[in-house]
Image (cartoon, helix red, strand yellow):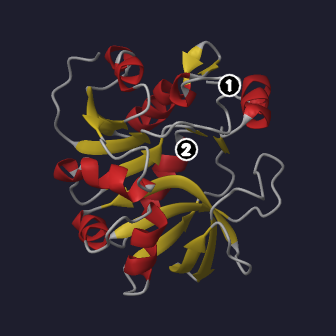
Amino acid sequence: MSSKAQTGRHAIVLAAGAGSRLSDVEPVKPLSRVGGRPLLLHVLDALAAAGAASASVVVGHRAADVAAVLPDAPIPAKAVSNPRWETAPNGVSVLAAAEAVRPGTFLCMSDHLIDPLLPRRLLAGATAPLALAVDRRLGHPWVDEADVTRVRTDGRQIRAIGKQLKLYDCYDTGLFLIGPDLVAALKAQASPSLSDGVAALAARGLAEAVDIGDARWLDVDDARALALARAKWRR
């Protein structure tokens, strides 16, 4: 682990889920190796390259195994437990790390490979209390259209988000800049998903979409995506 002091921009990485769609080939999804390195560390590499100085990694399934790789992270990274990981949506994982949230905190999924260009573009374009990096390249061959979270926008404003949207114009890449407004929106709901929190802020005009352009990303959620990552992704 780097000896760099835990100051500067913080990142929260969600790594608590069981990864059921990948469990037949990888028992701990965040530790699936691409190019000899766990997915989780690829994510932290990209965030560090974009300016993150420290991280909270929310753990649940096989928590000790996930925490064991954090000393190899490029920035100081602390495991934070979500005791409700088996039964609650991913918004509860965000709340598990709520004490670390400040304006401009990165939030990312542990199974989304992201090029460092993606968080840099998000930082350059973000102005709202919540900013989501979106991909407007509909039909991209790396995206699982049946499972991706869909977003409908009006200019920069997010109007709707969810996996079941019929009308949408971009994809959720799994990378956000967040602040206390998201924490408050999640706390106001009994058992929220992250999308529930985004939708609540969008209804108040506090959530925006930032186009990532041609920056690469890949949601490694099943065996097909893992094979694609191992064949196509370069660190």
- Between 194 and 228, the one lying in front of the other is 194
**Badge number at residue 102:** none
Give x and y (percent) for residue 44: 43, 31
Sequence-earlier tag: 2 or 1? 2
Residue 68 vs residue 4: left or right? right
Label 2 secondary element: helix
Residue 79 vs residue 26: left or right? left
| Residue 215 vertical placement versus 213 (above, below) | above
| Residue 73 vertical placement versus 52 (above, below) | above
> Residue at coordinates 49% horizontally, 34% vertically from top-left?
43
Quadrant into which the C terminus falls:
top right
Give x and y (percent) for residue 214: 69, 52
- Between 204 and 146, the one lying in front of the other is 146
Q: State how many labels appear.
A: 2
Label 1 secondary element: loop
Give x and y (percent) for residue 162: 59, 70
Q: Label 2 neighbourhood size at 10 Å, few (<14), some (14-19), many (20+)?
A: some
What residue is shown with label 2? 117
User: For residue 5, what is the image quadrant?
Assistant: top left
> Residue at coordinates 39% horizontally, 50% vertically from top-left?
107
Q: Are marks 2 and 1 in contact (CB under 8 Å)?
A: no
What residue is shown with label 1? 234
Q: CA distance from mark 2 to mark 1?
A: 14 Å
Residue 110 vs residue 79: left or right? right
> Residue at coordinates 57% horizontally, 73% vertically from top-left?
161
User: For residue 227, what is the image quadrant?
Assistant: top right
User: For residue 172, what is the image quadrant?
Assistant: bottom right
